[in-house]
């Protein structure tokens, strides 16, 4: 499998981080956490405050890296939806690559909800299916989902390998099996199938690597460039 998609990046760092993303997805799959809607989400109150919209806000005085690791260690205490799961997996892989100290410097005041993520988790979206690589986040879209079950409008998933995907709530499945699971949640009588969309998302590996090499906290209170990260049916502006 070819790596080094990011121009100017270190192919070895990218290879290792993609492996860490896959490993984190496998950890989550076996960690005991449950799928839930935002309304029914839950978290470990030792590390997180659950907000009214079902998100998880880092408690004051808690190490960001310890709070993320707890999701994978004490999964039975957590329930959340699939977009949050993807961000958690990317955070876990980032900790594994740059270390707890660097992560705690750069990823303060964490808030987990849908596709909300810290500015320093820079994400890149591609729309060429031929560029999909294990470790990417992909999206299975279910355009004719039951309108009373918005949670089944699609499934965010980590590409683990050729025709192997992890989606929180659905587990590890082939493309065909993912689509079959979503098709069971369509409007009765629908003939419009779910499908794997063209888009794929991955971290800016070169930037993540730079965080592990720098000792100074990057300033975020100056002029900012909007970064567009799109996965599924929404567009996110940082």
Image (cartoon, rainbow, N blue to C red):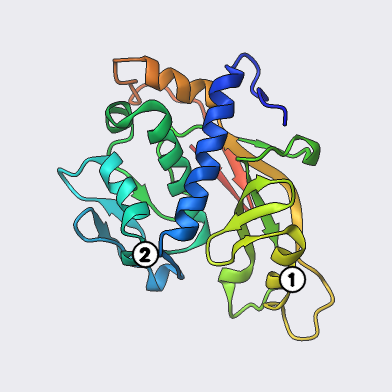
Q: Please state which of residues 12 and 67 is positioned toward the viewer in this rendering.
A: 12
Task: Return the residue found at the far bottom.
Answer: 188
Tell me the number on the disc at residue 198. none
Q: Which residue is mark 1?
A: 180
Tell me the number on the disc at residue 54. 2
Q: What percent of the width, then of the height, locates residue 146?
A: 66, 78
Residue 49 quadrant: bottom left
Residue at screen point 34% across, 66% down: 76
193 vs 168, left or right, is: right
Relative to 148, residue 238 above or below: above
In the picture, the quarter occupied by the N terminus is top right
Q: Please state which of residues 179 and 96 is positioned toward the viewer in this rendering.
A: 96
Mark 2: few, some, or many residues within 10 Å (few <14, many ≥20)? many
Q: What percent of the width, then of the height, locates residue 8?
A: 62, 13
Residue at screen point 47% across, 54% down: 85
Q: What percent of the width, then of the height, locates residue 166?
A: 59, 55
Earlier residue among tags 2 and 1: 2
Q: Secondary structure at mark 2?
A: loop
Relative to 107, residue 22 above or below: below
Residue at screen point 68% across, 25% down: 5
Relative to 231, residue 238 above or below: above
Task: Return the residue found at the far left.
Answer: 61
Res 226 seen here: yes
């Amino acid at each position: 499998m070819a790596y080094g998609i990011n121009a100017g990046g270190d192919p070895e760092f990218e290879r290792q981080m993609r492996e860490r993303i896959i490993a984190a997805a496998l950890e989550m799959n076996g960690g005991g956490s449950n799928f839930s809607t935002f309304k029914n989400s839950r978290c470990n109150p030792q590390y997180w405050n659950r907000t009214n919209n079902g998100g998880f806000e880092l408690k004051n005085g808690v190490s960001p890296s310890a709070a993320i690791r707890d999701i994978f260690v004490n999964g039975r205490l957590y329930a959340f939806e699939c977009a949050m799961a993807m961000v958690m997996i990317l955070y876990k892989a980032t900790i594994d690559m740059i270390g707890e100290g660097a992560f705690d410097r750069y990823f303060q005041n964490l808030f987990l909800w849908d596709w909300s993520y810290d500015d320093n988790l820079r994400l890149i979206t591609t729309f060429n299916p031929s560029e999909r690589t294990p470790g990417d986040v992909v999206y299975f879209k279910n355009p004719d989902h039951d309108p009373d079950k918005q949670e089944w409008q699609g499934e965010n998933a980590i590409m683990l390998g050729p025709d192997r995907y992890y989606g929180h709530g659905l587990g590890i499945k082939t493309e065909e099996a993912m689509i079959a699971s979503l098709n069971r949640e369509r409007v009765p009588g629908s003939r419009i199938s779910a499908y794997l969309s063209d888009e794929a998302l991955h971290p800016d590996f070169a930037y993540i690597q730079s965080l592990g090499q720098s000792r100074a906290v990057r300033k975020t209170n100056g002029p900012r460039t909007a970064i567009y990260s799109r996965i599924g049916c929404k567009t996110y502006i940082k």
